[in-house]
Amino acid sequence: MSWILSRFVENCQKAFIPDVSLTVDEQLFPTKAHCRFTQFMPNKPDKFGIKFWMLAELNSKYCLNLKPYLVKDEERVSSLGTHVVMTLMEPYFGRGYNITMDNFFTSVELAQKLLDRCTSLVGTLRLDRKEIPVSSKMATHDSVFYSCDSLNLVKYQAKPSQRKLL
């Protein structure tokens, strides 16, 4: 199966030259088969399946790279999100691409690694990440800008903050 998947990815990369904007995300392919890497994801329409990490061109949604999540990876030395993005982007480094991703992947460590390889990152960050500066409550639609070396962070309050009433 890995031979077929590698040939598919190779043909996808040969057949298409992507625009400057790429995106990384996960995709669950539903299956009823029982194997060691079948995943359960309660927030997906099909709860069980095989999870794939995908790199796609943003506008056309064309698949550029694909890697199955096989639970254990002995090659991984950094966080899972960083490892996935660096692996999927390997053929596209040094060409000035921009990657968009969600908060699972985004980190300051990854942004720095990508910047070292002439690639930029746009993504959301979880507020509980250690990289996020702690600040006071913000009004709705306010922004605070942070900068460190060549990295920039914008903290934006999109919704009114919810206060718990006792």
Image (cartoon, rainbow, N blue to C red):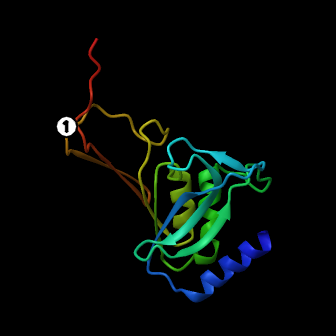
Left or right: 31 as drawn, with respect to 134: right
The location of residue 140, given as percent across then percent down, is 19, 40
Write the residue at 43% across / 71% down. 58
Name the residue furthest top.
166
Name the residue furthest front.
32
The location of residue 132, given as percent across then percent down, is 42, 41
Quarter in which the C terminus is drawn: top left
Write the residue at 66% across / 55% down. 31
Residue bearing mark 1: 139
Q: Nearer the viewer, residue 107 or 15?
A: 15
The location of residue 21, given as percent across then percent down, is 43, 73
Left or right: 30 as drawn, with respect to 138: right
Residue kind at label 1, given as amino acid type: Ala
Q: How many marks?
A: 1
Q: Nearer the viewer, residue 132 or 33?
A: 33
The location of residue 144, given as percent across then percent down, is 27, 46
Write the residue at 57% across / 61% down. 113
Quarter in which the N terminus is drawn: bottom right
- Crowd rating for badge 1 (residues with CA inside 10 Å; few <14, some 14–19, many 20+): few
Q: Nearer the viewer, residue 133 or 39?
A: 39
Q: Please, what secondary structure does the residue beneath circle 1 have? A: loop
